[in-house]
Image: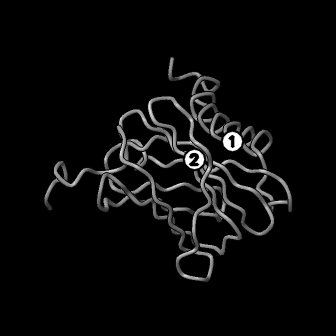
Amino acid sequence: MLKNKHVIAALIITPILSVLAYFATDAYVSEKPHKAIEGEQYPLVAKSNCRYASGQCTLENGDVEIKLRTQSIANGLRTLDLESNIELSAAKVALSYDNEANEPTNMSNVDGQGQKWSAEFRDGNSETDQIQLVIVARNSIYYAQTGLIFETNESAEFTR
């Protein structure tokens, strides 16, 4: 069987053609990256650290990266801190407790440069609570929805 020159040629050429076809299909079908258009809406994608109690949730789309953290304060309240790699014009957040939606809250600009924002909310069940975030950056609107499971309880934190 391996004495036939056609079989040997096929064994050499087939893997090369399959790899070339894979990359050609990707180049033909994939979406080409483009700049955000003013006034358009774009979703932010939640990274894997949003799915477990990591203490931080990273949302991104292209060159826009948002980091969310929660921090416990007094009397059953928590703060939601937002840090952005670009300047934001506005930020709003709405939290849903036990599948019950609340009114959106304007986040307050903490650093005066539009990169750090904060809002207060009451403690809930981080297993089921959802957060909806809308930000305005470069006259484009970015939005995301993710769970609050990333929030860590001080009693459940592990030590390094």
**Residue 1 location (% of width, % of height):** 51, 16
Q: Amino acid at mark 1?
A: Leu
Dot 1 surroundings within 10 Å: few (below 14), some, or many (20 or more)?
A: few
Quarter occupied by residue 61: bottom right
Quarter occupied by residue 111: bottom right
Q: Earlier in the sequence, mark 1 or mark 2?
A: 1
**Residue 122 location (% of width, % of height):** 40, 49
Q: Which residue does the numbered mark 1 point to in the structure image?
A: 20
Task: Report the disc number at residue 73.
Answer: none
In the picture, measured across the screen, residue 159 lies left or right of residue 138, that is left
**Quadrant (top left, top right, bottom left, bottom right) of the C terminus:** bottom left
Quarter occupied by residue 73: bottom left
Q: Amino acid at mark 2?
A: Ala
Residue that lies at the very extreme toward the left in this rendered image: 159
Whole-angstrom CA distance, mark 1 to mark 2, is 47 Å
Secondary structure beneath dot 1 equals helix
Residue that lies at the very extreme toward the top in this rendered image: 1
Residue that lies at the very extreme toward the right in this rendered image: 38
Q: Which residue does the numbered mark 2 point to in the structure image?
A: 94
In the rendered image, the vertical position of residue 97 relative to residue 108, given as above or below: above
Q: Residue at x 36, y 55 (%)?
A: 77
State how many labels appear. Answer: 2
Residue that lies at the very extreme toward the bottom in this rendered image: 112
**Residue 21 location (% of width, % of height):** 71, 36
